[in-house]
Image (tube, rainbow, N blue to C red):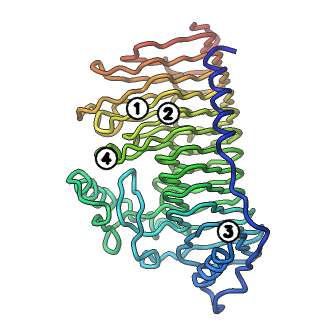
Amino acid sequence: MTTEQTSAVDGAAAVRAMVRPPIFPDRDFRLTDFGSGGRDHTDAFREAIEACHQAGGGRVVVPPGDYLTGPIRLLSGVNLHVSAGATVRFRREPEAYLPEVPTRWQGVELMGYSPFVYAHGARDIALTGAGTLDGQADDAHWWAWKPLEPADFAQLERLADDDVPASRRVFGEGYHLPPSFVQPYSCENVLIEGVTLTNSPFWQIHPVLCRNVTVTGVTARSHGHNNDGCNPESCDGVVITDCDFDTGDDCIAIKAGRNSDGRRLAVACRNIVISNCTFANGHGGVTIGSEMSGGVEHVYAAHLRMDSPNLWTCARFKTNSVRGGFIRDVHVTDVTVGRVGNQVLEIDFAYEEGDAGPFLPEVDGIHLSGWRVASTDAPWRLAGYPRGPIGTVTLTDIVIDSALSPAVAHEVTDLRLDRVTVNGRLLG
């Protein structure tokens, strides 16, 4: 193995040794034993979770059936287990997700609508089982807010730029910033396992400021606006394995806060392992950014399968001089690609605002190895700044059978090609 490949193996092993799923007492609380009956089970979820928490932890079991609810808030020691044959459907009325809670929206802190499954400051929590969680978002509910989001988000960004405390950035009734589906916030020891998520209002799995997170065996299948699959943000120690992503935006997007708010908090997202996942539709397979102002480092992705003409890019790194921040020590290895729409690798320093700020991003130590690609438009498109180029990018043992357009690399300090073949031609 090359030095970079050895570093990837060792780095992933160290993260796996650090990240361990929580363990829960052998104690079950059956959802249907709580609440007053009726069609809406919001009270039953709250009562069962509180009873489980107060007893010292265990499982809240959702048996087979169909359950309508408002927001679900997990407490320490609680494993919410959605059994095979169970479907949890979330109410469509925005007012059901009030009062506002501390959250992030595209990398900026605020008091906003409660995520559908939410925890704040909890330890040892889980969402498990072979059941389905249906956000019931569609073009008439939540997704219809898309045209109204930019103005509200611009107002939120102005408050952040003016250093207004997050507790006073209240964006509930009358605003149009939809909540994430599953969001542990400032939590430790988190497990999300086995469930299927569909029809999400916004990002699907969004751990924020968490430590020790495991996401495994999850199906994230939702095609609405901004329906990213799994977006760890400013977390330390995340393992994402054996998941199936088919999304309306990036499949996995690693983030670390946006612009002035991201720099104020200055919490990097680091020590991330991604393995044995499949990627279908989406803007990017493994993505970093664009909300990366706190920095991203030590990312190890391996044994991935990507295949869809509606997947734009396999490995996507997006930033600009308004975001700033850094991306470093990233390894994406052993990837099999059928068809990808635009390019295998993209590093874009001109995402959204372009070169419009004083915060030069640092992107360095990007390593791709062991890729086999059947078909793409372009092998790679790399675009840094003349005043702040991309650092080292290494491509090793890459075979691309068919590329319609040539590779593009502008303002890259050190692009290293080792056994890279495109259209049957050895490039280096």
Q: Is residue 44 above or below residue 128?
A: below
Tag 1–tag 2 contact (CB < 8 Å): yes
Q: CA distance from mark 4 to mark 2?
A: 18 Å
Q: Which mark is residue 264?
A: 4
Q: Are marks 2 and 3 in contact (CB under 8 Å)?
A: no
Q: Earlier in the sequence, mark 4 or mark 3?
A: 3
Query: Residue 73 location, x and y as percent?
Result: 55, 71
Cα distance in 3D space between marks 1 and 4? 15 Å
Residues under labels 3 and 1: Cα distance? 36 Å
Q: Are marks 3 and 1 in contact (CB under 8 Å)?
A: no
What residue is pinned by disc 1?
326
Tag 2 residue: 297
If you read the primary sequence from the N terminus, does the residue marked by circle 4 or circle 2 appear first?
Answer: 4
Asked which secondary structure carries label 2, the reply is strand
Q: Amino acid at mark 4?
A: Arg
How many residues crowd around disc 3 within 10 Å: few (fewer than 14), some, or many (20 or more)?
A: many
What amino acid is labelled 1 in the image? Phe
